[in-house]
Image: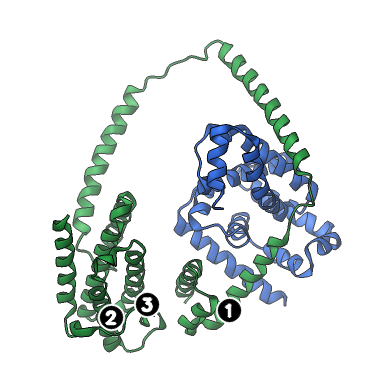
Amino acid sequence: MVNINSYLKNFKKSGDNIWFEKIYVQFLPRIYRFFYLKLFDKQLSEDLTSEVFIRVYKNLQKINLNAKTFQSWIYRIALNLLMDHYRRKTRYGKEEPLEETADDLIGNDMLLKNSSILKKELGFENFKLIGAMGKLTKLQKDIIILKFVEDFDYETIANIFGKSQSTIRGILFRAITKLKNEIKNNK
Amino acid sequence: MNGKTEKIFNRCLKLISRGYSIQYCLKKYSRYKDTLEEYFETIKHLENLKNIKPKDVNIKSSLDKIYSSAKNNTEQDMDKIKSKAAAPGSGRRVSLLKPAVVFITVLVVTIFSFAGTVYASQNSLPGENLYPVKRTAESIQLFFYPESKKGQLHFKLLNNRIYEADTLMESGQDSDIELIEELLFEIDEEYYQCKKYNFFEAGNEEEAITTINNIKSKYHNKYGQHNQDTEEHSVYNEDTGNKENMSNEENMRENERNQNRKGNGK
Protein backbone atom coordinates (compact mmCIF):
# COMPACT_ATOMS: atom_id res chain seq x y z
CA MET A 1 0.00 0.00 0.00
CA VAL A 2 3.02 2.24 0.51
CA ASN A 3 3.61 2.59 -3.22
CA ILE A 4 0.03 3.46 -4.12
CA ASN A 5 0.66 7.07 -3.10
CA SER A 6 3.49 7.42 -5.58
CA TYR A 7 1.56 5.61 -8.34
CA LEU A 8 -1.36 7.98 -7.87
CA LYS A 9 0.88 11.02 -7.81
CA ASN A 10 2.79 9.98 -10.92
CA PHE A 11 -0.35 9.10 -12.84
CA LYS A 12 -1.92 12.43 -12.04
CA LYS A 13 1.23 14.27 -12.99
CA SER A 14 2.20 12.45 -16.17
CA GLY A 15 -0.99 10.65 -17.24
CA ASP A 16 1.26 7.74 -18.21
CA ASN A 17 -0.72 4.49 -18.28
CA ILE A 18 2.17 2.58 -16.76
CA TRP A 19 1.19 4.01 -13.35
CA PHE A 20 -2.45 3.11 -13.84
CA GLU A 21 -1.35 -0.44 -14.67
CA LYS A 22 0.47 -0.70 -11.35
CA ILE A 23 -2.64 0.42 -9.47
CA TYR A 24 -4.75 -2.01 -11.53
CA VAL A 25 -2.51 -4.97 -10.71
CA GLN A 26 -2.71 -4.22 -6.99
CA PHE A 27 -6.46 -3.72 -6.79
CA LEU A 28 -7.73 -6.20 -9.40
CA PRO A 29 -7.81 -9.26 -7.10
CA ARG A 30 -9.36 -7.29 -4.24
CA ILE A 31 -12.19 -5.76 -6.24
CA TYR A 32 -12.86 -9.07 -7.96
CA ARG A 33 -12.98 -10.85 -4.59
CA PHE A 34 -15.37 -8.23 -3.23
CA PHE A 35 -17.82 -8.86 -6.09
CA TYR A 36 -17.35 -12.61 -6.06
CA LEU A 37 -18.16 -12.89 -2.34
CA LYS A 38 -21.43 -11.05 -2.99
CA LEU A 39 -22.47 -12.68 -6.25
CA PHE A 40 -20.67 -16.07 -6.47
CA ASP A 41 -20.53 -15.63 -10.22
CA LYS A 42 -17.08 -15.53 -11.79
CA GLN A 43 -18.03 -14.00 -15.13
CA LEU A 44 -20.26 -11.34 -13.65
CA SER A 45 -17.63 -10.46 -11.03
CA GLU A 46 -15.02 -10.04 -13.77
CA ASP A 47 -17.35 -7.82 -15.82
CA LEU A 48 -18.19 -5.60 -12.87
CA THR A 49 -14.51 -5.41 -11.88
CA SER A 50 -13.67 -4.15 -15.39
CA GLU A 51 -16.46 -1.59 -15.12
CA VAL A 52 -15.00 -0.32 -11.84
CA PHE A 53 -11.60 0.22 -13.46
CA ILE A 54 -13.16 1.97 -16.46
CA ARG A 55 -14.73 4.48 -14.07
CA VAL A 56 -11.51 4.80 -12.11
CA TYR A 57 -9.49 5.43 -15.26
CA LYS A 58 -11.97 8.02 -16.50
CA ASN A 59 -11.89 10.07 -13.29
CA LEU A 60 -8.59 9.40 -11.59
CA GLN A 61 -6.76 12.34 -13.12
CA LYS A 62 -9.50 14.77 -12.18
CA ILE A 63 -9.35 14.27 -8.42
CA ASN A 64 -6.73 14.45 -5.72
CA LEU A 65 -6.44 11.21 -3.79
CA ASN A 66 -3.98 9.53 -1.49
CA ALA A 67 -3.72 5.79 -0.85
CA LYS A 68 -6.38 5.85 1.87
CA THR A 69 -8.94 8.03 0.13
CA PHE A 70 -8.35 6.09 -3.08
CA GLN A 71 -9.30 2.86 -1.28
CA SER A 72 -12.55 4.37 -0.03
CA TRP A 73 -13.30 5.81 -3.44
CA ILE A 74 -12.73 2.64 -5.47
CA TYR A 75 -14.88 0.56 -3.08
CA ARG A 76 -17.64 3.15 -3.21
CA ILE A 77 -17.61 2.81 -6.99
CA ALA A 78 -17.80 -0.97 -6.59
CA LEU A 79 -20.72 -0.66 -4.15
CA ASN A 80 -22.60 1.70 -6.48
CA LEU A 81 -22.14 -0.68 -9.38
CA LEU A 82 -23.41 -3.52 -7.25
CA MET A 83 -26.52 -1.48 -6.39
CA ASP A 84 -27.10 -0.74 -10.07
CA HIS A 85 -26.76 -4.41 -10.81
CA TYR A 86 -29.31 -5.34 -8.12
CA ARG A 87 -31.74 -2.73 -9.42
CA ARG A 88 -31.52 -4.17 -12.89
CA LYS A 89 -31.97 -7.69 -11.54
CA THR A 90 -34.90 -7.04 -9.22
CA ARG A 91 -38.29 -6.56 -10.72
CA TYR A 92 -39.93 -5.03 -7.66
CA GLY A 93 -40.28 -1.27 -7.47
CA LYS A 94 -39.90 -0.97 -3.70
CA GLU A 95 -37.15 1.40 -2.63
CA GLU A 96 -35.74 0.50 0.76
CA PRO A 97 -35.51 -3.25 1.06
CA LEU A 98 -34.57 -3.61 -2.59
CA GLU A 99 -30.83 -4.08 -2.18
CA GLU A 100 -31.11 -6.28 0.87
CA THR A 101 -33.61 -8.59 -0.79
CA ALA A 102 -31.72 -8.64 -4.03
CA ASP A 103 -28.46 -9.39 -2.28
CA ASP A 104 -29.95 -12.28 -0.35
CA LEU A 105 -31.74 -13.64 -3.38
CA ILE A 106 -28.88 -13.39 -5.82
CA GLY A 107 -26.15 -14.57 -3.48
CA ASN A 108 -28.12 -17.37 -1.85
CA ASP A 109 -29.66 -18.48 -5.14
CA MET A 110 -26.23 -18.87 -6.65
CA LEU A 111 -25.08 -20.76 -3.56
CA LEU A 112 -27.96 -23.22 -3.76
CA LYS A 113 -27.98 -23.68 -7.53
CA ASN A 114 -24.25 -24.10 -7.94
CA SER A 115 -23.39 -25.63 -4.60
CA SER A 116 -21.31 -28.47 -6.01
CA ILE A 117 -19.32 -26.17 -8.31
CA LEU A 118 -18.84 -23.61 -5.58
CA LYS A 119 -17.70 -26.24 -3.08
CA LYS A 120 -14.97 -27.09 -5.58
CA GLU A 121 -14.10 -23.47 -6.32
CA LEU A 122 -14.02 -22.28 -2.74
CA GLY A 123 -13.10 -25.41 -0.80
CA PHE A 124 -15.46 -27.06 1.67
CA GLU A 125 -14.52 -24.93 4.71
CA ASN A 126 -14.92 -21.64 2.84
CA PHE A 127 -18.20 -22.85 1.35
CA LYS A 128 -19.54 -23.57 4.84
CA LEU A 129 -18.34 -20.18 6.06
CA ILE A 130 -20.05 -18.40 3.18
CA GLY A 131 -23.23 -20.34 3.93
CA ALA A 132 -23.07 -19.02 7.49
CA MET A 133 -22.42 -15.50 6.20
CA GLY A 134 -25.75 -15.77 4.38
CA LYS A 135 -27.39 -15.16 7.78
CA LEU A 136 -25.84 -11.70 8.04
CA THR A 137 -27.40 -8.54 6.64
CA LYS A 138 -25.91 -6.98 3.54
CA LEU A 139 -24.16 -4.24 5.50
CA GLN A 140 -22.81 -6.67 8.11
CA LYS A 141 -21.44 -8.87 5.33
CA ASP A 142 -19.78 -5.93 3.56
CA ILE A 143 -18.16 -4.65 6.72
CA ILE A 144 -16.91 -8.04 7.82
CA ILE A 145 -15.36 -8.67 4.38
CA LEU A 146 -13.67 -5.26 4.29
CA LYS A 147 -12.30 -5.60 7.82
CA PHE A 148 -11.10 -9.18 7.97
CA VAL A 149 -10.61 -10.18 4.33
CA GLU A 150 -9.35 -6.87 2.94
CA ASP A 151 -7.72 -5.67 6.21
CA PHE A 152 -9.20 -2.19 6.06
CA ASP A 153 -9.04 0.08 9.09
CA TYR A 154 -12.20 1.48 10.70
CA GLU A 155 -11.58 4.93 9.25
CA THR A 156 -11.61 3.71 5.64
CA ILE A 157 -14.69 1.52 6.18
CA ALA A 158 -16.48 4.44 7.84
CA ASN A 159 -15.65 6.62 4.82
CA ILE A 160 -16.95 4.04 2.37
CA PHE A 161 -20.32 3.73 4.08
CA GLY A 162 -20.60 7.34 5.27
CA LYS A 163 -20.99 6.24 8.91
CA SER A 164 -19.04 6.98 12.08
CA GLN A 165 -16.25 4.67 13.21
CA SER A 166 -18.09 3.75 16.41
CA THR A 167 -21.16 2.70 14.39
CA ILE A 168 -18.94 0.53 12.20
CA ARG A 169 -17.36 -1.02 15.32
CA GLY A 170 -20.80 -1.86 16.70
CA ILE A 171 -22.02 -3.40 13.44
CA LEU A 172 -18.80 -5.38 13.08
CA PHE A 173 -19.06 -6.82 16.58
CA ARG A 174 -22.70 -7.87 16.12
CA ALA A 175 -21.79 -9.42 12.76
CA ILE A 176 -18.81 -11.40 14.02
CA THR A 177 -20.82 -12.60 17.05
CA LYS A 178 -23.65 -13.79 14.77
CA LEU A 179 -21.19 -15.49 12.43
CA LYS A 180 -19.34 -17.16 15.30
CA ASN A 181 -22.61 -18.53 16.73
CA GLU A 182 -23.77 -19.67 13.31
CA ILE A 183 -20.52 -21.60 12.73
CA LYS A 184 -20.78 -23.10 16.22
CA ASN A 185 -24.38 -24.24 15.62
CA ASN A 186 -23.53 -25.77 12.25
CA LYS A 187 -20.69 -27.90 13.64
CA MET B 1 -21.75 -8.85 29.65
CA ASN B 2 -22.04 -8.46 25.88
CA GLY B 3 -21.08 -4.79 26.11
CA LYS B 4 -18.00 -5.69 28.13
CA THR B 5 -17.05 -8.44 25.64
CA GLU B 6 -17.43 -5.94 22.81
CA LYS B 7 -15.08 -3.52 24.55
CA ILE B 8 -12.49 -6.22 25.21
CA PHE B 9 -12.80 -7.50 21.62
CA ASN B 10 -12.22 -4.00 20.22
CA ARG B 11 -9.27 -3.44 22.52
CA CYS B 12 -7.76 -6.71 21.30
CA LEU B 13 -8.19 -5.70 17.66
CA LYS B 14 -6.51 -2.39 18.46
CA LEU B 15 -3.59 -4.12 20.17
CA ILE B 16 -3.22 -6.57 17.27
CA SER B 17 -3.22 -3.72 14.76
CA ARG B 18 -0.31 -2.26 16.73
CA GLY B 19 1.69 -5.44 16.33
CA TYR B 20 0.82 -7.34 19.54
CA SER B 21 0.11 -11.05 19.12
CA ILE B 22 -3.20 -12.82 19.70
CA GLN B 23 -1.51 -14.75 22.50
CA TYR B 24 -0.59 -11.48 24.26
CA CYS B 25 -4.21 -10.42 24.06
CA LEU B 26 -5.53 -13.74 25.39
CA LYS B 27 -3.08 -13.48 28.27
CA LYS B 28 -3.95 -9.88 29.04
CA TYR B 29 -7.69 -10.62 29.10
CA SER B 30 -7.42 -14.16 30.43
CA ARG B 31 -10.88 -13.91 32.03
CA TYR B 32 -12.34 -13.71 28.51
CA LYS B 33 -9.91 -16.21 26.98
CA ASP B 34 -12.50 -18.79 25.83
CA THR B 35 -14.82 -16.24 24.22
CA LEU B 36 -11.96 -14.38 22.56
CA GLU B 37 -10.54 -17.62 21.18
CA GLU B 38 -13.84 -18.33 19.47
CA TYR B 39 -13.80 -14.87 17.89
CA PHE B 40 -10.24 -15.25 16.65
CA GLU B 41 -11.05 -18.67 15.24
CA THR B 42 -13.86 -17.09 13.19
CA ILE B 43 -11.54 -14.30 12.01
CA LYS B 44 -8.99 -16.93 10.95
CA HIS B 45 -11.71 -18.64 8.87
CA LEU B 46 -12.51 -15.31 7.24
CA GLU B 47 -8.87 -14.66 6.40
CA ASN B 48 -8.87 -17.89 4.33
CA LEU B 49 -11.17 -16.11 1.88
CA LYS B 50 -8.14 -14.04 0.82
CA ASN B 51 -7.22 -16.99 -1.42
CA ILE B 52 -10.08 -16.16 -3.79
CA LYS B 53 -8.51 -14.64 -6.91
CA PRO B 54 -9.61 -14.03 -10.49
CA LYS B 55 -8.45 -16.55 -13.08
CA ASP B 56 -5.18 -15.64 -14.78
CA VAL B 57 -6.05 -12.66 -16.89
CA ASN B 58 -4.07 -11.09 -19.66
CA ILE B 59 -3.37 -7.76 -18.00
CA LYS B 60 -2.44 -6.02 -21.25
CA SER B 61 -5.59 -6.93 -23.16
CA SER B 62 -7.83 -6.15 -20.13
CA LEU B 63 -6.19 -2.76 -19.79
CA ASP B 64 -6.61 -2.06 -23.52
CA LYS B 65 -10.32 -2.78 -23.16
CA ILE B 66 -10.53 -0.44 -20.17
CA TYR B 67 -8.73 2.38 -22.00
CA SER B 68 -10.92 2.13 -25.11
CA SER B 69 -14.19 1.85 -23.10
CA ALA B 70 -13.21 4.83 -20.97
CA LYS B 71 -12.50 6.86 -24.13
CA ASN B 72 -15.88 5.95 -25.69
CA ASN B 73 -17.73 6.75 -22.46
CA THR B 74 -16.03 10.13 -22.18
CA GLU B 75 -17.09 11.06 -25.72
CA GLN B 76 -20.69 10.07 -24.95
CA ASP B 77 -20.62 12.15 -21.76
CA MET B 78 -19.38 15.19 -23.70
CA ASP B 79 -22.26 14.82 -26.17
CA LYS B 80 -24.75 14.69 -23.29
CA ILE B 81 -23.29 17.84 -21.74
CA LYS B 82 -23.49 19.68 -25.06
CA SER B 83 -27.12 18.72 -25.65
CA LYS B 84 -28.03 19.76 -22.09
CA ALA B 85 -26.36 23.13 -22.53
CA ALA B 86 -28.30 23.72 -25.72
CA ALA B 87 -31.65 22.92 -24.04
CA PRO B 88 -33.86 25.99 -23.37
CA GLY B 89 -34.40 27.05 -19.75
CA SER B 90 -31.26 25.35 -18.50
CA GLY B 91 -29.87 28.58 -17.09
CA ARG B 92 -32.64 29.24 -14.52
CA ARG B 93 -31.31 31.11 -11.46
CA VAL B 94 -32.51 30.52 -7.95
CA SER B 95 -32.42 33.27 -5.32
CA LEU B 96 -29.84 32.28 -2.71
CA LEU B 97 -30.14 35.27 -0.36
CA LYS B 98 -32.98 34.01 1.84
CA PRO B 99 -31.59 30.55 2.57
CA ALA B 100 -28.16 32.12 3.19
CA VAL B 101 -29.52 34.48 5.90
CA VAL B 102 -31.38 31.63 7.60
CA PHE B 103 -28.31 29.45 7.41
CA ILE B 104 -26.00 32.08 8.92
CA THR B 105 -28.48 32.82 11.76
CA VAL B 106 -28.81 29.13 12.61
CA LEU B 107 -25.04 28.75 12.44
CA VAL B 108 -24.36 31.68 14.82
CA VAL B 109 -26.95 30.47 17.35
CA THR B 110 -25.61 26.92 17.18
CA ILE B 111 -21.99 28.03 17.65
CA PHE B 112 -22.84 30.15 20.71
CA SER B 113 -24.92 27.50 22.43
CA PHE B 114 -22.30 24.83 21.62
CA ALA B 115 -19.49 26.99 23.02
CA GLY B 116 -21.49 27.59 26.23
CA THR B 117 -22.18 23.89 26.70
CA VAL B 118 -18.53 22.99 26.07
CA TYR B 119 -17.39 25.56 28.65
CA ALA B 120 -19.85 24.21 31.21
CA SER B 121 -18.72 20.64 30.59
CA GLN B 122 -15.03 21.23 31.40
CA ASN B 123 -15.29 20.08 35.02
CA SER B 124 -17.63 17.17 34.39
CA LEU B 125 -16.77 13.60 35.33
CA PRO B 126 -17.57 10.25 33.67
CA GLY B 127 -21.18 9.30 34.24
CA GLU B 128 -22.37 12.92 34.27
CA ASN B 129 -24.61 14.31 31.56
CA LEU B 130 -22.10 16.82 30.21
CA TYR B 131 -19.16 14.42 30.14
CA PRO B 132 -19.77 13.26 26.54
CA VAL B 133 -19.70 16.95 25.50
CA LYS B 134 -16.30 17.36 27.15
CA ARG B 135 -14.96 14.29 25.36
CA THR B 136 -16.37 15.39 22.01
CA ALA B 137 -14.77 18.82 22.46
CA GLU B 138 -11.44 17.09 23.20
CA SER B 139 -11.73 14.96 20.06
CA ILE B 140 -12.43 18.04 17.95
CA GLN B 141 -9.50 19.88 19.52
CA LEU B 142 -7.28 16.87 18.82
CA PHE B 143 -8.42 16.74 15.22
CA PHE B 144 -7.52 20.36 14.51
CA TYR B 145 -4.32 20.47 16.60
CA PRO B 146 -1.07 20.74 14.61
CA GLU B 147 0.74 17.39 14.27
CA SER B 148 3.88 18.76 15.95
CA LYS B 149 2.00 19.68 19.14
CA LYS B 150 -0.27 16.65 19.40
CA GLY B 151 2.02 15.02 21.98
CA GLN B 152 1.54 18.04 24.25
CA LEU B 153 -2.25 17.79 23.95
CA HIS B 154 -2.21 14.04 24.59
CA PHE B 155 -0.21 14.74 27.74
CA LYS B 156 -2.87 17.21 28.86
CA LEU B 157 -5.55 14.59 28.14
CA LEU B 158 -3.51 12.01 30.08
CA ASN B 159 -3.55 14.36 33.08
CA ASN B 160 -7.29 14.93 32.64
CA ARG B 161 -7.99 11.18 32.69
CA ILE B 162 -5.78 10.71 35.77
CA TYR B 163 -7.57 13.57 37.55
CA GLU B 164 -10.98 12.08 36.66
CA ALA B 165 -10.00 8.58 37.81
CA ASP B 166 -8.60 10.01 41.06
CA THR B 167 -11.71 12.09 41.74
CA LEU B 168 -14.01 9.13 41.06
CA MET B 169 -11.99 6.95 43.43
CA GLU B 170 -12.16 9.64 46.09
CA SER B 171 -15.96 9.77 45.76
CA GLY B 172 -15.79 6.06 46.65
CA GLN B 173 -18.96 4.71 45.04
CA ASP B 174 -18.77 1.08 43.99
CA SER B 175 -20.96 1.79 40.98
CA ASP B 176 -18.08 3.79 39.50
CA ILE B 177 -15.75 0.79 39.16
CA GLU B 178 -16.60 0.25 35.49
CA LEU B 179 -16.02 3.93 34.74
CA ILE B 180 -12.68 3.90 36.55
CA GLU B 181 -11.60 0.76 34.67
CA GLU B 182 -12.46 2.49 31.43
CA LEU B 183 -10.43 5.54 32.49
CA LEU B 184 -7.45 3.37 33.38
CA PHE B 185 -7.55 1.87 29.91
CA GLU B 186 -7.70 5.33 28.41
CA ILE B 187 -4.77 6.42 30.56
CA ASP B 188 -2.75 3.61 28.92
CA GLU B 189 -3.99 4.79 25.57
CA GLU B 190 -2.98 8.43 26.16
CA TYR B 191 0.41 7.34 27.47
CA TYR B 192 0.90 5.35 24.27
CA GLN B 193 -0.08 8.40 22.19
CA CYS B 194 2.38 10.64 24.10
CA LYS B 195 5.11 8.12 23.31
CA LYS B 196 4.01 7.90 19.70
CA TYR B 197 4.39 11.66 19.28
CA ASN B 198 7.78 11.59 21.07
CA PHE B 199 6.50 13.86 23.82
CA PHE B 200 8.63 12.17 26.45
CA GLU B 201 11.88 13.02 24.72
CA ALA B 202 11.92 16.13 26.91
CA GLY B 203 12.49 13.80 29.88
CA ASN B 204 9.26 13.84 31.87
CA GLU B 205 8.38 10.20 31.16
CA GLU B 206 9.47 9.02 34.59
CA GLU B 207 7.07 11.39 36.36
CA ALA B 208 4.24 10.32 34.09
CA ILE B 209 4.95 6.64 34.76
CA THR B 210 5.05 7.30 38.50
CA THR B 211 1.72 9.09 38.39
CA ILE B 212 0.11 6.34 36.31
CA ASN B 213 1.47 3.61 38.56
CA ASN B 214 0.29 5.53 41.64
CA ILE B 215 -3.25 5.81 40.32
CA LYS B 216 -3.26 2.12 39.42
CA SER B 217 -1.95 1.15 42.86
CA LYS B 218 -4.64 3.31 44.41
CA TYR B 219 -7.22 1.47 42.34
CA HIS B 220 -5.87 -1.93 43.34
CA ASN B 221 -5.73 -0.96 47.01
CA LYS B 222 -9.28 0.30 46.95
CA TYR B 223 -11.00 -2.35 44.84
CA GLY B 224 -8.51 -5.21 44.91
CA GLN B 225 -7.71 -7.31 41.80
CA HIS B 226 -11.16 -6.68 40.45
CA ASN B 227 -10.32 -6.88 36.81
CA GLN B 228 -7.55 -8.06 34.49
CA ASP B 229 -7.79 -4.85 32.45
CA THR B 230 -6.03 -2.85 35.09
CA GLU B 231 -2.85 -4.86 35.15
CA GLU B 232 0.14 -2.62 34.95
CA HIS B 233 1.30 -2.31 31.40
CA SER B 234 4.60 -3.96 30.62
CA VAL B 235 6.00 -0.76 29.10
CA TYR B 236 5.77 0.99 32.44
CA ASN B 237 8.81 1.12 34.63
CA GLU B 238 7.99 -0.52 37.92
CA ASP B 239 10.91 1.25 39.59
CA THR B 240 9.46 4.55 40.65
CA GLY B 241 12.75 5.83 42.14
CA ASN B 242 12.83 8.67 44.65
CA LYS B 243 9.50 10.05 43.53
CA GLU B 244 7.74 6.94 44.80
CA ASN B 245 6.19 8.69 47.77
CA MET B 246 4.73 11.60 45.87
CA SER B 247 0.96 11.86 45.85
CA ASN B 248 -0.91 11.83 42.57
CA GLU B 249 -1.80 15.47 42.80
CA GLU B 250 1.82 16.45 43.45
CA ASN B 251 2.88 14.43 40.44
CA MET B 252 0.26 15.97 38.26
CA ARG B 253 1.23 19.43 39.38
CA GLU B 254 4.88 18.70 38.68
CA ASN B 255 4.02 17.37 35.24
CA GLU B 256 2.17 20.55 34.47
CA ARG B 257 5.03 22.65 35.81
CA ASN B 258 7.44 20.80 33.49
CA GLN B 259 5.03 21.43 30.71
CA ASN B 260 4.88 25.17 31.42
CA ARG B 261 8.65 25.38 31.72
CA LYS B 262 8.95 23.71 28.36
CA GLY B 263 6.46 26.15 26.88
CA ASN B 264 8.28 29.18 28.33
CA GLY B 265 11.60 27.92 27.10
CA LYS B 266 10.38 28.08 23.49
Location of residue B106 (image quadrant): top left
The residue tagged with tag 1: helix, strand or loop? helix
Q: Which mark is residue B235?
A: 3
Q: Amino acid at mark 2?
A: Asn
Q: Which residue is painted at 49% across and 61% down in the image?
A: A169
| Spot occupied by residue B50 in the image (x, y as percentages of width and height) | 68, 61
The disc, 1 or 3, on the residue closer to the chain's N-terminal end is 1
In the picture, the quarter occupied by the C terminus of chain A is bottom right
Please report contact status of discs 2 and 3: CB closer than 8 Å, yes or no. Answer: no
| Spot occupied by residue B236 in the image (x, y as percentages of width and height) | 33, 78
Q: What residue sits right under mark 2 in the picture?
A: B213
Q: Which residue is painted at 58% across and 70% down in the image?
A: A177
Task: Tell me: residue A51, above or below residue B78.
Answer: below
For label 2, the crowd category at 10 Å Cα-Cα, with few meaning under 14, some 14 to 19 and many 20 or more, is: many
Q: Which mark is residue B123?
A: none
Q: Colour of chain B?
A: green
The residue tagged with tag 2: helix, strand or loop? helix
For label 3, the crowd category at 10 Å Cα-Cα, with few meaning under 14, some 14 to 19 and many 20 or more, is: few
Residue A180 seen: yes
Residue A185 shown left or right of residue A114 in the figure? left
Q: CA distance from mark 1 to mark 2?
A: 30 Å
Task: Tell me: residue B7, above or below residue B104.
Answer: below
Q: CA distance from mark 2 to mark 3?
A: 11 Å
**Do the residues indicated by labels 1 and 2 lie within the same chain of the protein?**
yes
What chain does mark 1 sit on?
Answer: B
Q: Colour of chain A?
A: blue
What chain does mark 3 sit on?
Answer: B
Q: Amino acid at mark 1?
A: Glu
Q: CA distance from mark 1 to mark 3?
A: 25 Å
Q: Which mark is residue B37?
A: 1
Task: Tell me: residue B5, above or below residue B153.
Answer: below
Along the line of sight, which residue is nearer the eye, B76 or B169?
B76
